[in-house]
Image (cartoon, rainbow, N blue to C red):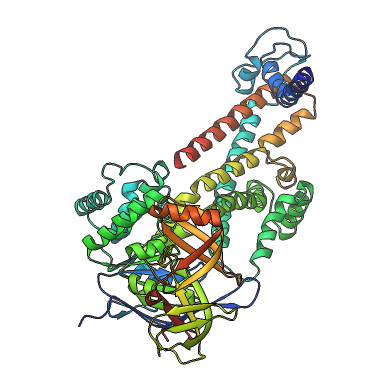
Amino acid sequence: MQPSIVRLERVTKTFALPEGGMITALKAIDLDVRRNEFLTLLGPSGCGKTTLLHSISGFVQLDGGKVSIDGEDVTERPPHRRPVNTVFQNYALFPHMNVDKNVGYALDIAGTDGKERGRRVGAALELVGLSGLGGRLPRQLSGGQQQRVALARAIIARPKLLLLDEPLSALDRNLRQAMQIELKGLQAELGISFIFVTHDQEEALTMSDRLAVLEKGVIQQLDTPRSVYSRPANAFVASFIGASNLFEGAARSDGTDMLVVTPNGEHIRAAGSGTVANGQPVTALIRPEQFSLHNGGNGQPAAFIDADVEQIVFTGLNYQIHGRTPAGRKVVAIIAAVHQREVAEIDAAKKARLTYDPAGVQLIGASGGEP
Amino acid sequence: MRWLRNIGTGTLSAYTALFFAFIYLPIALIVIYSFNADPVNMMRWSGFTFDWYKQIFGLRNVTSENALYIESTEQLLKAVRNSLTVAAFTTTIATVLGTATALALYRFNFLGKKFYRVLLFAPMLMPDIVLGIALLIFFISVGFSLGITTIVIGQCSFLTSYVFIVVSARLAGMDRTLENASADLGANDWVTFRRIILPQAMPGVIGGALLAFIISMDDLVITYFISGVDTQTLPIFIFGMLRRGIKPEINAIAVMMLLFSFAVASAGLYLRSRRG
């Protein structure tokens, strides 16, 4: 079997804070990046995701651990001798060079001959849809165009993998969504691995084959977007990926189902039994879209939470209902826009009975991971 | 209350006009007087003439007893030549040293960096007289004979600071990630310096060189101390003339210097604008 395109082994980096003290940006991280995969590093700012990216490109000196690219140990190699290229957050286009010179920079340094250079620059510009703009200076381009120049410049040397450091964060929403799809297409076309850094969970879910959620220098979970969303490894991942209603409490079995009993006396019902021992601390996760307003036909609803409605936000696709349980805990429910009659009712009553299916409730063990 | 606002605006406009008149009127008068035919009283207009210009270029010799205190055109031209020689050397040396220092302080961290930076600012704050005396004492005590060389060394000692400050300001506005981008694309440190850092620093370097050149051409106080008896730069020469009374040729010389400065500054600005 071929080695992974990137392998990190116990990669560690500590920074000194300007006000004194140290911060651990990377805590003995192990990571294997597969060939041709779109891997996203996701986390809040300061979680270590950019440092992790820089440990692959070579811009940080590691305190410990080993970085291999395509089976070769590159831990001690300077950035200019590593077979990776980066798309920087602010694009980092050279302001005194035109688009052609920017894109051809790597070839000019490698001494590629003029004919070959011209052909490849032309091809790269065509790939990103900027043919004919070679003579422009970066400042004469729009944000989206600059982004494409940065992309073309980074792929022209045919790197073994492409690193992208929050490349879309400066674009407006519509352009960002278009670029997300384009990037994914480009990755498939080039047939190389992309490592993409972002703090935007929606972006991560949309684009990735796998995503790694980072917090405090540790990979909290590494899995496909669907698995990370539906089976978060711990409360941090659950709250960072998508909005979540988390109920911490103690487990109790009532014979058929598990109950999570919070200190305030709320009961959350989860299907299945015997997965958590009685009395064990456990957190129940209910996604906002898992709530509904009907009682599920006749008879008693399977499970519900009563809430005082504080605010209803209409987003076009749906209603976000922000409420509070009698015990004072905030809950968020998302109700599709077609249910406007029911929403109008609860808006008038300022009270809502939020029902949910116990089979959809996720239980997260206190120590992280599935209980 | 409209009239009150009108008065306010009017006063402000008048003040602005006065301010600019205060700055530019004397200069305008010099230009006008340089064409005034009256050899004795500059304030009395007695006809238009190119005589003073002809005089300084040695094209005409007026031998009226009142006029023409230029000792000789040759001396004047020699002073101009000295000034240009000094300025050329000083500008080159100060630009190279100042730029190199700015780059070093931009690029590297080392012990005492802040202190070093303060030391580089100090010559700008030092009174000219003090610097002049200090240099004079230094040159004499180490046994240098005063002349062009000492002027060049002396001027470099403070013009390097000017260049350093101008170039540093330019570098401070530069994006450090561009260096990462260059390295990422396969460039080693030297290639990055040559292709990314230097081209971007260039407007600062040109600006610093220009400033050094103009200050060098213009410097009187410090140069006066360290020029010795035989070497005269243009400002020293003019100062010498003035001590024997303000003569009409001075106006012509002043106008020539003004034009020269404008030409140099325009050339520099043009170069800067082309490099963005």
Say which residue appears at 62% left-offset and 51% top-offset. Answer: B165
Residue A110 located left or right of residue A303: left
* Residue B126 placement, left or right of A88: right
Q: Is residue A57 above or below residue A22?
A: above
Residue B245 placement (x, y as % from top left): 80, 24
**Residue A223's image quarter?**
bottom left
Considering every residue shown, the one lying at the far front of the view is A299
Residue at image position (45%, 70%) is A49
User: How many numbered badges does the structure rendering display?
Assistant: 0
Residue B96 visible? no
Q: Can residue B18 be seen in the rendering of this structure?
A: yes
Q: Position of residue A117 (x, y in %)?
A: 23, 53
Q: Quadrant of the N terminus of chain A?
A: bottom left
Q: Quadrant of residue A256?
A: bottom left
Question: Is residue A19 or residue A335 the one in the foreground?
Answer: A335
| Residue nearest the observer in this picture, A91 or B150 | A91
- Percent of width and height locating residue A75: 38, 79
Q: Position of residue B190 (x, y in %)?
A: 42, 62
Residue at point 22% right, 51% down?
A123
Image quadrant containing the C terminus of chain A: bottom left
Give the residue furthest to the bottom.
A277
Relative placement, left or right, of B36 versus A114 is right
Q: Nearer the viewer, residue B170 or A246?
A: A246
Considering only vertical position in the picture, is B162 above or below B233? below
